[in-house]
Amino acid sequence: MDSRRKELYVEGRRDRLFFNWLLGENRHPDTVIHEIDSVGIEAPHEGGNRGKLFFFAQAIAPHKLAVRCFADADFDRILNRQCPDNIWLTDSRDLEGYFLQVACIEKVLRLAMACERLNPESVLSEVRGVARQLGVLRLLSAQRNLKLPFQERPLKPYVKRSKDRVALDFDSYLQSLLQGAKISLKELGKIKSDHLALVEATNGVDERQLLHGKDCLAVLCVLLKTDEFKETAVEPSCWASLDREVLKGFPNLEAALAYLGSTKTKQP
């Protein structure tokens, strides 16, 4: 490998494009960003592309290469999971956490939706209220290895809007998840009790480490869609709301950018 060459491996296409856009002209000519699917990994691993990324990082660690990885934090911080030294974790639970900011939501409301009525702080409060419940449920699933099929059981049918508020039919969604995991509904009461206890236990946990980006986007779709602003426009608008200014101050993201960037910093 060229001694000047530096490589960053990421989970997928969105992550690669995110870094390419964010670096812009500050990208060093000898740096390359790869999706982990570009690596042929045949050894057994769990966790999709994130699992592949961790397996790869551990495999190359002894060789002291100029190669780093950037992955979703998932619940690693909350569960005190050990992370390889050659991996940076997202500052929030996942990449979507970077646009869960007032400034970004305000941009979606004012510029994408042309909406003056909604307040970005109130919108985020509604999102967090639902997504935190689900984040704790996801955490419980991880702790107890319940393997609840969140990806196969869409959230949106269980989130209802009333004016500018949203409510989650938690019991019905949990039943659906249990059925998908082939767990007897006799366990429903116990799991609800354990969930409530974990809600209390995680009361002081930084919500940025709990909120799952896909849950937040699902709630935003229900809350923001109108006849003029289609549900399919919500996620692209959230990503487009990012700018380099709102992404300052995130230490792990800044470390990755410094690693990839030019020695001469150019103004955006």
Image (cartoon, helix red, strand yellow):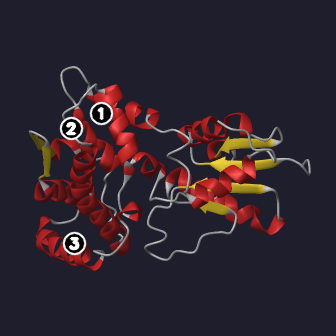
Q: Earlier in the sequence, mark 1 or mark 3?
A: 1
Please report the residue visible at 63 percent of the width from the left and 43 percent of the height from the top: 37
Left or right, residue 244 beside residue 215:
right
Task: Determine if residue 26 is in view.
Answer: yes
Which mark, residue 195?
3
Asked if the residues shown at circle 3 and circle 2 are in contact, with their CB atoms under 8 angstroms apart, the answer is no
Asked if the residues shown at circle 1 and circle 3 are in contact, with their CB atoms under 8 angstroms apart, the answer is no
Q: Which residue is mark 1?
A: 109
Q: CA distance from mark 2 to mark 1?
A: 7 Å
Above or below, 48 against 157 in this view is: below
Local secondary structure at mark 3 = helix
Local secondary structure at mark 2 = loop
Q: CA distance from mark 3 to mark 2?
A: 32 Å
Q: Amino acid at mark 2?
A: Leu
Please report the residue visible at 32 percent of the width from the left and 67 percent of the height from the top: 141
How many numbered tags mark residues here?
3
Q: CA distance from mark 1 to mark 3?
A: 33 Å
Q: Nearer the viewer, mark 3 or mark 2?
A: 2
Please report the residue visible at 66 percent of the width from the left and 57 percent of the height from the top: 255
Which mark, residue 118?
2
Rendered location of residue 243, percent (x, y): 52, 38
Q: Earlier in the sequence, mark 3 or mark 2?
A: 2
